Amino acid sequence: MLRDLVRRNRSYRRFSQKDAIDIQTLRELIALARLSPSGGNLQPLKYVLSCNPATNDMIFQHLTWAIYLKDWPGPGDGERPSAYIIILGDKAIAGSFGYDTGIAAQSMLLGAVEKGFGGCIIGSVTREKLTAALDLPEHLEILLVLALGKPAEEVAIDPLGPDGKIQYWRDGQGVHHVPKRLPEELIFRELP
Amino acid sequence: MLRDLVRRNRSYRRFSQKDAIDIQTLRELIALARLSPSGGNLQPLKYVLSCNPATNDMIFQHLTWAIYLKDWPGPGDGERPSAYIIILGDKAIAGSFGYDTGIAAQSMLLGAVEKGFGGCIIGSVTREKLTAALDLPEHLEILLVLALGKPAEEVAIDPLGPDGKIQYWRDGQGVHHVPKRLPEELIFRELP
């Protein structure tokens, strides 16, 4: 059921790095993005795929992890992602990429979860440097990076406390806690 | 399987209007949006739900349908949506809504498909007028409208032709054709 997939699709930041993801798996995720809605059907998104450890290492250098965990610099050796999908916007096709990016990212993440993997949407990317490292042509802009792997951490969903804090945190057992607003806060109005 | 859901999740614009969608179904879709990723975990999206025919009629007046079908003003009586979810951005929480909107929209649409419904993401909304009609407070901004119902049209996915045209079109039998770029065009590079 989709609800189960959505619930299991947490933002994972620690992985079992020895569990590889093959290129065919990444292509299957792109197939999901391909069949997802696109504003005006322009389909301006392009993708760069990586599942080779050395190339993954290069990409990893350009990412910043978990802004709210000040004392944690990101996943260490052995717990890093096994693959990346870099989402690009093709400026030759569209001037902006609207809602397509989020839509495609969610399709791919849900697909990864179904396959026993998981991931994290990373928006904090040193774009200029990664663009140079990938030698991307002028018309392709890095939008987001999906980090993918076999999750090796537990993520708990908590109700937002009375303090209203939305910052995720890790407890003494290493469980990652994510406060989520309750449905009654999200539903502004049910129209009569 | 998710792939099947993603494939069946086409942008439907004609529905069997007599098939109602109840408020509980809409709440279940919001539950999917609630558990979807949010940038910095801010969760700035809010929702207005409508499944009452008279209220649906009011919302319908504020939407523009299918920009590429110049001779079609939108669904007629009897084939209009049975429900709407209006996605709002709460400016008291965030200055912009990044990828959250697309992510949440895709979760909800896939959920609708799983329940035997389908929908269309509508970005062409007369926002000022709908904001006034809903009497929304200053801090809530209309981002998108999801139109939902029991699909009553066939949608075919075609490969993009050599002319590169991405405009969808309807054939003589009323089948809605959507040209989709092929995977080899979407995958810019598979890194070695």
Image: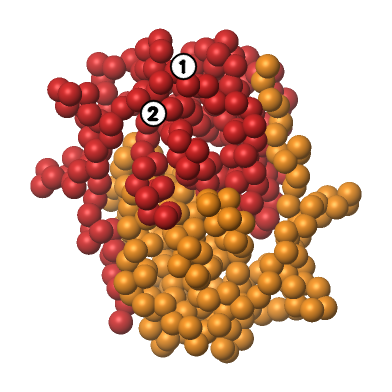
Chain colours: A red, B orange
Q: Which amino acid does label 1 sit on?
A: Lys
Q: Which amino acid does label 2 sit on?
A: Pro
x then y, percent, for residue B134: 35, 74
Dot 2 lies on which element? loop
Q: Tell me the residue at 53%/76% (across/down).
A: B150
How dense is the environment of label 2, judged by Cα within 10 Å: few (below 14), some, or many (20 and up)?
A: many
Q: Point out residue A166 in the picture as x, y percentages from the top left corner.
A: 23, 40
Q: In this view, does A135 lie above or below B109?
A: above
Q: Dot 2 falls on which chain?
A: A
Which badge, 2 or 1, comes first in the chain's sequence?
1
Q: Where is residue A114 in the image (x, y as percent from the top left)?
A: 47, 42
Please give the label number shown on residue A18.
1
Same chain under badges 2 and 1? The reply is yes
Which residue is the extreme one toward the left? A162
**Residue at x 60% of width, y 26% of height:** A22
From what the image shows, is residue B92 above or below residue B29? above
x 60%, y 61%: residue: B8
Q: In which quarter of the image is residue B56?
A: bottom left
Which circle marks residue A151 in the picture? 2
